[in-house]
Amino acid sequence: MPNINNINFLTTNNISNTQLIEKQNNIDFSKIVKEKIDQLNEKQIEAENKTIELIKGEAKDIHEVMLSVEEARLSLELAIQIRNKLVEAFQELNRMQL
């Protein structure tokens, strides 16, 4: 004969696991976008600061400056492409008939 306490434990455990999974799946999209835009902004500022250091003659390695500038450029290009895809998806959803 099965123990009733074990059955209650399994049911309670499954409910708490389900709630945990729901909390993990409840990701705030706007928070993620804001964090990524902040990271992009930091890369742009870093590249600008390193470029200013190079102009002033304070930079020791031109390769580091070039890498920083190129990384900032590629990050911005990626962000623009992601934005374009999101706008395209939004427009496609608006064209759908319900």
Image: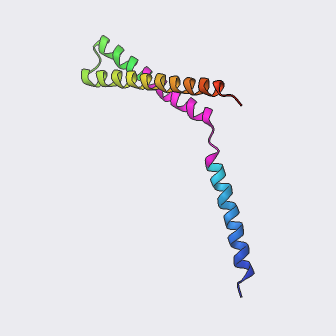
Is any atom of residue 61 visible in this view? Answer: no
Depth check: give the residue in front, 92 or 5: 92
Q: Is residue 66 magenta?
A: no
**Identity of the residue drawn at 34% across and 16% down:** 51
**Identity of the residue drawn at 43% across and 21% down:** 44
Is any atom of residue 80 visible in this view? Answer: yes
**Residue 68 placement, left or right of 32:** left
**Residue 71 placement, left or right of 13:** left
Query: Residue 13 falls in which quadrant of the image?
Result: bottom right
Depth check: give the residue in front, 76 or 66: 76
- Can you name the residue that lies furthest to the top here? 55
On screen, residue 36 above or below 44:
below
Depth check: give the residue in front, 82 or 93: 93
On screen, residue 1 above or below 92:
below
Q: In the image, which residues are magenta? A: 25-44
**Identity of the residue drawn at 65% across and 44% down:** 26
